[in-house]
Image (tube, rainbow, N blue to C red):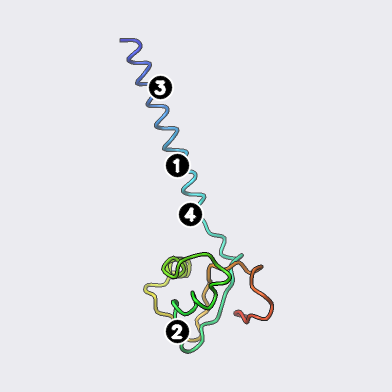
Amino acid sequence: MKKHLQSIKFYSFFFIFIALFTYTVTAAAGETNIEKYATITVSSGDSLWGLSRQYKDYHKMSSTDFIEWVCSNNQLKGDTIHPGDKIHIPVLKKKIPASVVLAE
């Protein structure tokens, strides 16, 4: 009986540790430092699909992942953007050449 209780204690602590570790890793991974990403001004005719293709050389995401990232990190209700909108895109500022026009 004593071994059984020790076993239960061990597994209880083990699962609590795993749960806390998983929560910590997930919480840390979920935080995005938006300041390090490029901000662009949407032009007439732009779409998120088009922007994904336009910046494909600067990110390694699928178009779907690109759009989900943009919607999530810009608090967009849908995938519609409008001329003049300033949005963050999942492209590091340091990877964009100076010749590419970004938001001011």
The extreme left residue here reads 1
**SS class of the residue under badge 3?**
helix
Amino acid at the residue labelled 2: His
**SS class of the residue under badge 2?**
loop
Q: Which residue is mark 2?
A: 82
Amino acid at the residue labelled 3: Phe
Q: Earlier in the sequence, mark 3 or mark 2?
A: 3
Q: Earlier in the sequence, mark 4 or mark 3?
A: 3
Calculate the distance from the C-alpha at mark 3 to the C-alpha at mark 1: 18 Å
Residue at image position (57%, 74%) is 39
Calculate the distance from the C-alpha at mark 1 to the C-alpha at mark 2: 39 Å
Residue at image position (48%, 66%) is 73
The extreme bottom residue here reads 44
Amino acid at the residue labelled 4: Gly
Work out which quarter of the rendered image holds the C terminus and state it: bottom right
Q: Which residue is mark 1?
A: 22
